[in-house]
Image (cartoon, rainbow, N blue to C red):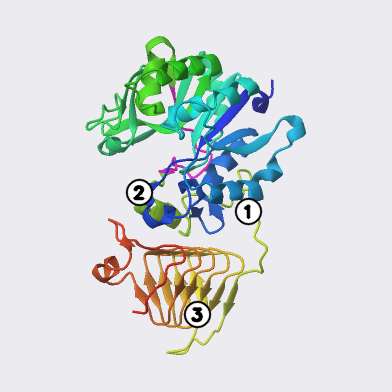
Amino acid sequence: MRLEAKVLTFILAGGKGERLGPLTLHRAKPAVPFGGIYRIVDVTLSNCINSGLRRIFVLTQYLSRSLTQHLRDTWSFVSRPTLGEFIEPLPPQHRLKGDWYAGTADALHQNRTQIEEQGPELLLVLAGDHIYKMDYGRMIDFHERVGADMVIGAIEIPAAEAGAFGIFEVDADGRVIGFEEKPAAAKEIPGRPGLALASMGIYTFGTASLLSALAADAADPASTHDIGRDLVRRIMRDHKVYAFPFVDENKKGFKYWRDVGTVDAYWEANMDLVAIDPQLNLYDAGWPLFSTPVNAPPPKFVFAQEEPGGRLGVAIDSLVSSGSIVSGGRVHRSILSPFVRVNSYAQVWDSLLFDGVSIGRGCRVRKAIIDKGVRVPEGTVIGEDLERDRKRYYVSPGGVVVIPKNAVVEPA
């Protein structure tokens, strides 16, 4: 049986993303822009399409309009309904007790009717807010080969960072014999001092095993209805649970996986793209990332007055999207989304400028994320005096200044 016919995919995309600060005031976390022309969820969806998976439900909840619109405008091209293919947003159905998804396990439980109607052999459950390249078909093959009831995607991390992840213990065959969600102290991998095995938030389930576990979890008043905290242990009691080591399709000689749940992690993942040899390869035609086509002219760079005090429109170690104009300004190690304008004598370093941002003449912008539609007045300085910036904007622990969508920026 073809892979797409026997596997049903759920992408969990309904979280508030509060640690991303102002970036999620107006949109769900998976809908936050990434890399100039993408949204965060595009990475996971591209992995699905490149893996041959085309029956996909995207579970939405918090501020879902932007994400739903993006799915409609971008991803309809990959589905063929006559062949049973779809990418469909799925909000809470309000059929069971409670109005909203109470947790990731509850999100699956509320949609058990969809599972039963589709009748898959296996379910693939993914987070919609991680950055990586992975062929899910490898994990599905492993699931079938070992006869598992549940398989969890796993990646090696420094043991000191274990407090942010679900951590495994496995036997020599890869079967999970212990699991702790965000432990204060991690158990290291045998023979790999300083390293622990962490969950990537990627799961495959046998359908019957999952539906049985979901029903038991829903009836348990002590459960938090979370896959990591509750469902893994429940299935481990009576079923075979395995860990699948991450196989990276990024082809860079190291395993690239980023959880972009905080402003600093999100900024760093974008900065990974602007290096001379980017850590995440956007230019691999064999594993493309898909997003919304932008109907815009090519980016434009104007003024070449290189004498002292002259205007020079240039971008160095940067990504500049269609419709953008660098008009006598200088852009360094930054990402410009479509229709950004950087005016004369302005300087932008280490920053992310979302759609339609305008940087006025003579501005200096350092290590900032400026959201959609913001106009920065002439002569404004951002990112050089963080104490002053904190009085007006959100500043992350790592010193990234975030200016929210459509904010009115006062001249500085």
Q: Secondary structure at mark 3?
A: loop
Foreground residue among 341 and 275: 341
- Residue at (66% x, 56% y) in the render: 293
Q: Nearer the viewer, mark 3 or mark 2?
A: 2
Q: Earlier in the sequence, mark 1 or mark 3?
A: 1
Q: Check disc 1 and report the residue beneath it.
A: 292
- What amino acid type is highlighted by mark number 2? Arg
Left or right, 409 with respect to 88, comes to left
C-alpha distance separating marks 1 and 2: 26 Å
Q: Secondary structure at mark 1?
A: loop
Q: Position of residue 231 (x, y in %)?
A: 40, 22
Q: Check disc 2 and report the residue beneath it.
A: 19
Question: Start and end of the magenta stretch?
Answer: 243-258
Q: Position of residue 26 (x, y in %)?
A: 46, 55
- Where is residue 157, by image quadrant? top left
Q: Position of residue 146 (x, y in %)?
A: 50, 15
